[in-house]
Amino acid sequence: DAKTTQPPSMDCAEGRAANLPCNHSTISGNEYVYWYRQIHSQGPQYIIHGLKNNETNEMASLIITEDRKSSTLILPHATLRDTAVYYCIVLLNAGGTSYGKLTFGQGTILTVHP
Amino acid sequence: DAGVTQSPTHLIKTRGQQVTLRCSPKSGHDTVSWYQQALGQGPQFIFQYYEEEERQRGNFPDRFSGHQFPNYSSELNVNALLLGDSALYLCASSLAWDRRYTGELFFGEGSRLTVL
């Protein structure tokens, strides 16, 4: 699976959009981009995933560049409860042999301030 | 609909002892994966069980073993505990074959193991 690079930490004001970047320059054509987050003392939580199109769900939006070498997770209106470690993960062929084997990096610690 | 449940939530062992951690997957899920998360690090994949067999394994020694039962619940066993085994152990469940599969794993809250 391709390696990802994320900034170690970011800050965001409550109510503003939080934009979390991720570089995955070695991503291959059938690898998906996944985002998980881990709130302190809890297990990781799935947020969103995509292959090459932008995706949106009730939690966030995922913007993937046209060359697929980077992506941005957007939390449109951050709240204090969004303070967490956010992990960007590249996964080969969702549903295939890599199924369930997520490779977590260090992630980005997002702190949302009042 | 119960999510992934793990037990115990906390436990303390001494070096050389053995430990068993338990996991019940989310209702309807048939695949269980185990992860180890050391303090300040991201979770590391240990192994995955499907149809009562180990399907994938990460870079962990044989001291780490597991089992999956017919009801899909799972156990993680660690023998000859070392100080470095102190960590949060996370269980994640998923459905092996699903036409609507999103690749989403559902994680439990974890079992925090301290080895003294």
Image: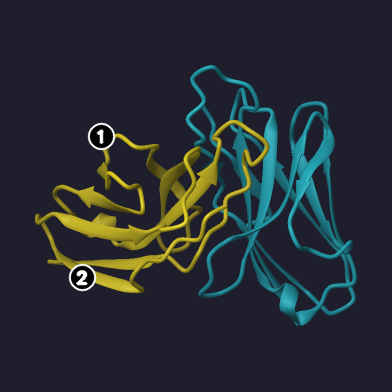
The yellow chain is A
Q: Is residue B57 above or below residue A6?
A: above
Residue topped by disc 1:
A58
Residue topped by disc 2:
A11
Label 2 sits on a secondary structure element that is strand
Chain ID, mark 2: A
Tell me which colouring the rendered structure shows. by chain
Q: Earlier in the sequence, mark 2 or mark 1?
A: 2
Q: Is residue B88 left or right of residue B57?
A: left
- Quadrant of res A96: top right
The cyan chain is B
Position in image of residue A92 (x %, y %):
56, 42
At 27% from the left edge and 55% from the top edge, which residue is drawn?
A82
At 68% from the left edge and 55% from the top edge, which residue is drawn?
B8
Q: Which quarter of the figure is the C terminus of chain A placed in?
A: bottom left
Label 1 sits on a secondary structure element that is loop
Q: Is residue B72 above or below residue B6?
A: above
Residue B115 visible to an observer of this rendering: no
Task: Same chain for labels 2 and 1? Say yes or no.
Answer: yes
- Quadrant of res A33: top left
